[in-house]
Image: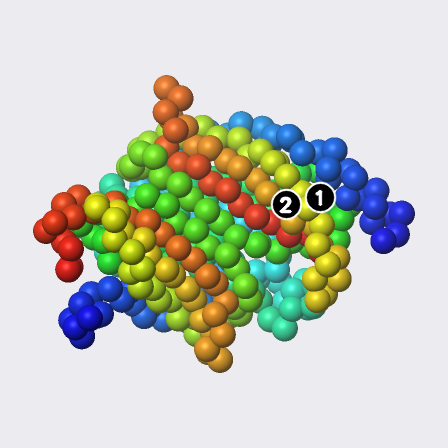
């Protein structure tokens, strides 16, 4: 595979550093006010070292990654994420992906997030349907 | 497993099939803007475009399943899956009801946990399926 093709098959990285404001913004927009995401004593009582990032916020970041990659070329058919580790406020969360398979107009993507120690904290996948697979085979 | 833990699991097993009350949600401009800002989405040329995970805002999180409070101390999110059957746009009206579809118990590093699955279908007023969400939630 050429360097250009490899680059075209890579998504991201997109690195976010979720602050308390980020978590509160997402809680407000999504309606998920589970205290683990903004109440430090509550999080500590559950045994967490700090405020945890919402799993669905990490999926939203992975969704961004996919939609920005596919912009104008296709639509998302499915998007999934499995949370394997927690991410915490003020620590970088790196979102990445790669193309794993092309089948006609469908492209299968592998997605993941990793923390600042390089541990993969989310494993995900998506399927994108391209509008014109022939024209975008190497895009 | 203690008697209390066993009865809490049994209560969850008995609750499989439970549905939350139906909800109606409309994709509104202000809400869409707040959600885009919250996830850090880039400005778009199409102001009516809806991010793939906006439907997460129309889920009850954490789930309001009454039987769940008897098991464990709190919630964790195990995973999410979205299946898209129709495009969503600004102004769309969606009807949904979260359904509790299953529970299993596992022994993890931190002790026993209950793995709960929920399915939510977002449909238009005419019944057309737009998005299906399957969520895995953990009580421990």
Residue shown at 31%/59% (left/top)?
A100
- Disc number for residue B29: none
Left or right: residue A82 compared with residue B28: right
- In primary-sequence order, the first of circles 1 and 2 is 1
Q: Is residue B10 above or below residue A111?
A: above
Picture quadrant where residue B82 is located:
top left
Q: Which quarter of the figure has residue A4?
A: bottom left
Q: Which residue ends up furthest to the left in the rendered image?
A: A135
Q: As displayed, is residue B62 above or below residue A54? A: above
Residue B134 in view of the camera: yes
Q: Secondary structure at mark 2?
A: strand
**Residue in front for this viewpoint, A36 or A14:** A14
Q: Position of residue A126 (x, y in %)?
A: 36, 52
Residue A139, position as x, y percentages in the image: 15, 59
The answer to which of A75 and A42 lies nearer the viewer is A75
Q: In the image, which is nearer the foreground, mark 1 or mark 2?
A: 2
Q: Residue at x 57, y 48 (%)?
A: B136
Residue B116: assigned label: 2
User: Which residue is labeled 1 in the image?
Assistant: B68
Q: Position of residue A79 (x, y in %)?
A: 39, 49
């Amino acid at each position: 595979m050429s360097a250009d093709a490899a680059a075209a098959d890579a998504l991201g990285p997109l690195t976010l550093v979720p602050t308390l404001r980020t978590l509160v913004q997402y809680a407000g927009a999504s309606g998920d006010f589970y205290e683990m995401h903004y109440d430090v004593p509550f999080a500590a009582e559950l045994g967490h070292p700090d405020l945890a990032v919402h799993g669905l916020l990490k999926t939203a970041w992975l969704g961004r990654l996919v939609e920005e990659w596919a912009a104008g070329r296709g639509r998302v058919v499915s998007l999934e994420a499995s949370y394997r580790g927690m991410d915490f406020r003020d620590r970088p969360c790196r979102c990445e992906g790669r193309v794993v398979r092309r089948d006609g107009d469908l492209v299968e993507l592998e997605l993941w997030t990793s923390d600042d120690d390089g541990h993969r904290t989310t494993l995900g996948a998506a399927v994108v349907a391209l509008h014109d697979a022939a024209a975008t085979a190497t895009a | 497993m203690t008697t209390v833990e066993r009865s809490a699991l049994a209560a969850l097993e008995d609750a499989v099939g439970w549905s939350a009350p139906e909800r109606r949600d409309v994709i509104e401009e202000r809400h869409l803007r707040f959600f885009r800002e919250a996830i850090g989405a880039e400005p778009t040329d199409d102001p009516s475009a809806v991010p793939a995970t906006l439907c997460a805002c129309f889920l009850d999180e954490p789930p309001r399943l009454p039987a769940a409070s008897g098991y464990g101390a709190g919630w964790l999110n195990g995973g999410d899956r979205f299946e898209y059957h129709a495009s969503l746009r600004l102004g769309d009206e969606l009807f949904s009801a979260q359904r509790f579809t299953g529970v299993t118990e596992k022994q993890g590093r931190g002790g026993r946990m209950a793995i709960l699955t929920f399915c939510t279908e977002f449909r238009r007023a005419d019944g057309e399926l737009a998005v299906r969400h399957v969520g895995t939630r953990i009580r421990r």
